[in-house]
Image (cartoon, grey):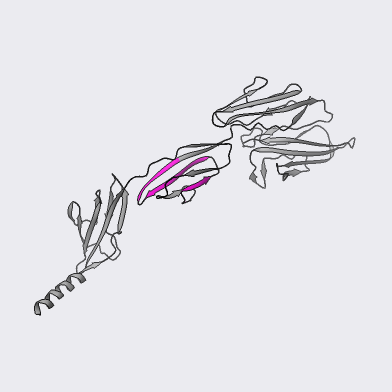
Amino acid sequence: MKKKIIYFLFILGWTTSAQKLNLLPDTVGICKGESTVLEAKNTSIPKTASYHWTSMKGITDHVEYIKVNEEGKYYVKVATGKNTYTDSCYVKFYPKPKKFIHDTLICNSTSAIIDAKNSSYKYIWSNDETTQRVRIDNSGKYWVKINNKGCAITDTFHVTFNSGSVPNFGNDVTFCLAEENKVLSIKTSPGTKTIWNTGATTFSINPTKDGIYWVRTENKVCGIKTDSVKVKLKACDCEIIVPNSFTPNEDGRNDYFFPVLSCDYSYYSFTVFDRWENIVFTSNNINAKWDGRFKGNLCPDDIYVYHIETIEKNSGKKEPRDGKISLFR
């Protein structure tokens, strides 16, 4: 009976001196072929403590951390005088996720779904999404952090939205004979070939006579597009010259849309509508210019409709004018 009591006291004394304290995570995942560092940390441990590590390679003493490059269970014992603390951690190696998201060119669309294609991984995208699939609405550079249970990589990719070209003139365009800036323009994307029925291969031409003008654009990704427009040239009294396109990209050239007036008016109204007939700009000031914005926000590339009303000061003649304007950035 005496031997049993002594043995019980010995076991009780050992278990109370080697106390459990959170020094290490229960498990750590890292990539195959890489290494990590296990460090025994806790605010309760004084700087004078001694360390004793047991690993796959044997025993390591007197260091707060060890470098790990083999899978298995690792133990640490920390002695602080009267108290001894123990903890363990299992280090698991996982396959490194592969980089598979390529640079993407999207044609004739305003959004794209990028799919990481592996539901067993965890994701953090550059737009703060954490799902397997994300929606991208703008051209640019993006990244995703792919995590396989602690083995993580970062994959970067570019998304580019390419419309190929935007040849959309409407039904007809009228220019005054005296107008110097008679221009038909289209917006082209990099890698797009352009051919007009005049033989020109530029993004714009200057029509010199009445007739039908057509343009053909070809892009190896976005395919072939064609459009045509009927051009009328006429002699105009008290002309108002209105361009058919402008580029409000703040480069100092063609940044504003406005009619050029050649007469004095007792009344003047200048209004621009979007394709849904919403007013995006209006003014009665003969010097007003539209900068391609609505309430301070950039308006998208598109075809807009303008409406001009005037009353000539001398004759009292009223003449409304309507037309289309292409906004390119």
Task: Pinpoint residue 127: horizontal percent, then vertical percent.
Answer: 49, 48
Visible residue check, residue 223: yes
**Residue furthest out toward the right:** 315
79 horizontally vs 190: left or right = left
Visible residue check, residue 39: no
Give the vertical position of 261 relative to 293 (above or below). Answer: above
Judge whether residue 129 is colored magenta. yes
Query: At 52% across and 46% down in the image, what residue appears?
Result: 135
Residue 240, picture quadrant? top right
Looking at the image, which is closer to me, 75 or 92? 92
Secondary structure mainly formed by the magenta segment: strand
Query: At 22% across and 59% down in the image, what residue appears?
Result: 76
Give the vertical position of 280 relative to 187 (above or below). Answer: below
**Residue furthest out toward the top:** 199
Specify start and end residues of the magenta stretch as a single range.
128-156
Task: Pinpoint residue 302: horizontal percent, then vertical percent.
Answer: 66, 38
